[in-house]
Amino acid sequence: MPIAERAARAYVAGPELSDALRTGHWLSRQGFASSIGFWNGDDDEPRQVADAHLAALDALAGENLDCYLSIKAPPLEFDRRLLAELLDRAHRRSIGVHFDSLGPEAADETFACIASARQHYPKLGCTLPGRWRRSLRDADSAVDLRLNVRVVKGGWVDPEMPEVDLRAGFLAVIDRLAGRATHVGVATHDPSLAREALRRLRSAGTSSELELLYGLPARQAIREAADAGVPVRFYVPYGRAWLPYSLSQARQHPGVLWRALRDSLAGRPLHPPALPPRERD
């Protein structure tokens, strides 16, 4: 657990919402947009998670930031009443809400929530992992629902397609969205992959941006965005949880804990020097 906690500290702005907002303002002064997301603990009740999201929406309404809220439906237990409360608040605050992806087993219910939410609030987004077989048809659904889409390689293996070329899967989703989607976030720190994905989207006339995870080396990817003439957005997690290195995930996917150990001890910086200093406990 100490190894996992140490590794995860590099990925979060801090334990409090104020830490995420402070980081968002720092990024804004550097010319970057942001998205903030509350990383809940395993013991947090859905009501607690919803309250954290509501507090974030209220806070963002008073900030001069290009920032949307990222949420995960499973910690809310896909509760339609809680989601309706969140979306009503987001609508009143005019703040976008993005549904992150977790494991493939949660995707059907997540998209059902999105489809229901889309009837009441249009400023929604979803995440599509390139490593999942279903992501191509989910891309079609995202186009039909006029969602903003974030494309990622994906951290959870698809049991229907455990062996997949992550770059090829990523670009296949990009191709499915190019020329059709409202807006696409290319979420990768791989410079060559970012370059090719942005090229394909720009050639198709599709609005796009580069999305990067706070805490990972970013300089080379940022150069690719500059060369492509697209903006950069950082995903800024906050909270006291230590996802993605939870013991529950480590039990299901032993490689996760190895990655945590490698990241902590390999001597490779987990966050780029350009990011703001963060207060430590």
Image: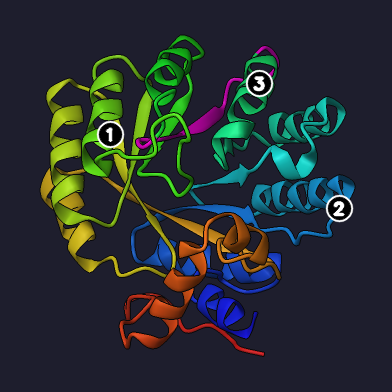
124 in magenta: yes
Q: Amino acid at mark 3?
A: Tyr
Q: CA distance from mark 2 to mark 1?
A: 36 Å
| Circle 2 or circle 1, nearest the eye | 1
Q: Amino acid at mark 1?
A: Gly
Q: Quadrant of the C terminus?
A: bottom right
Q: Residues within 10 Å of mark 3 (few under 14, many from 20)?
A: some
| Circle 3 or circle 2, nearest the eye | 2
State the SS at label 2.
helix
- Mark earlier in primary sequence (3, 2): 2
In the image: residue 70, left or right of residue 51: left
**Circles 1 and 3: CB atoms closer than 8 Å:** no
Residue that numbered label 1 is attached to: 169
Residue that numbered label 3 is attached to: 121
- Mark earlier in primary sequence (2, 1): 2
**Circles 2 and 1: CB atoms closer than 8 Å:** no
Q: CA distance from mark 1 to mark 3?
A: 30 Å
Q: Residue 55, relative to residue 99: is it above or below?
A: below
State the SS at label 1.
helix
> In the image, residue 276 lies at what x, y percent?
44, 78
Residue that numbered label 2 is attached to: 48
Stretch of the chain drawn in magenta? 119-131
Q: Amino acid at mark 2?
A: Gln
What's the residue at 75%, 62% (across, down)? 41
What's the residue at 67%, 69% (across, down)? 18
Q: Residues within 10 Å of mark 1 (few under 14, many from 20)?
A: many
> In the image, residue 173 lies at what x, y percent?
30, 27
- Mark earlier in primary sequence (1, 3): 3
